[in-house]
Image (tube, rainbow, N blue to C red):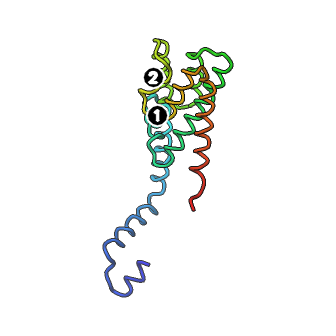
Amino acid sequence: FKDIFESFGTELPGITLVLLAISDFAKNNILYEMVLIIGLVLGFKMFARSNWGRHFIDSIKFKIPIFGKIVTKSTISRFCKTLGTLTKNRVQLVDALTISAETANNVVVQEIVEDVKKSVTGGISLARSMQNHAIFPSMMVKMIAVGEQSGALETMLEKVSEFYDLSLIHISEPTR
């Protein structure tokens, strides 16, 4: 391409010259590029394994457009399903919260649930404890409050889980 333009005796546009320079650099420095890529991958893996890195990555998951909503809804669904099953089987609420937080596989959620657990241990209702955290949608908190007041917390948790499972199906359906 470059030779064809040079044979006409014309000068290439500036953008084309930049692209050709980048292409030549990439072609002539493949070893450096491979080392750089391997270094970046290893660096990211080390970063992701650190406490700060895992917290950063887990918090970003909720903020990514479209994907963040899916992560939030699936996390809430899994958390509620586990919490509902555990409370239905007479596991103490504080212990059930600990186990349910682990199913989220997200350190941000685990920290939030730990805070909720401290509030519940201090005598505050589950719904009021969750109300202070933006990750829990207000509809979910209201349903849990109704479940606590009516003595059917496990039923409400199952309904919340079903609702968010169904909303995940609607996200993945193509629009017409």
- The quadrant of the rendering that contains the N terminus is bottom left
Residue at the (68%, 19%) spot, across then down: 89
Q: Earlier in the sequence, mark 2 or mark 1?
A: 2
Residue 19 drawn at (x, y percent): 38, 68
Front residue of this view, candidates 166 and 35: 166
Numbered disc total:
2
Front residue of this view, candidates 70 and 26: 70
Instruction: Please name the amino acid that badge 2 sits on.
Output: Arg
On screen, 18 above or below 141? Answer: below
Q: Residue furthest toward the bottom? A: 8
On screen, 24 above or below 119? Answer: below
- The quadrant of the rendering that contains the C terminus is bottom right
Residue at the (44%, 36%) spot, across then down: 59
Q: Tell me the SS state at disc 2.
A: helix
What's the CA distance linking mark 2 and mark 1?
11 Å
Instruction: Please name the amino acid that badge 1 sits on.
Output: Ser
Quick one: label 2, few (<14), some, or many (20+) residues within 10 Å? Answer: some
Please tell me in which quadrant of the rendered image residue 131 appears.
top left
Q: Residue furthest toward the front? A: 150
Q: Tell me the SS state at disc 1.
A: helix
Front residue of this view, candidates 4 and 98: 98
Residue at the (55%, 21%) spot, across then down: 148
Q: Which residue is mark 1?
A: 138
On screen, 53 above or below 7? Answer: above
Q: Which residue is mark 2?
A: 128
Image-based side of 170 in relation to 2, left or right: right
Residue 103 drawn at (x, y percent): 60, 29
Please tell me in which quadrant of the rendered image residue 147 appears.
top right
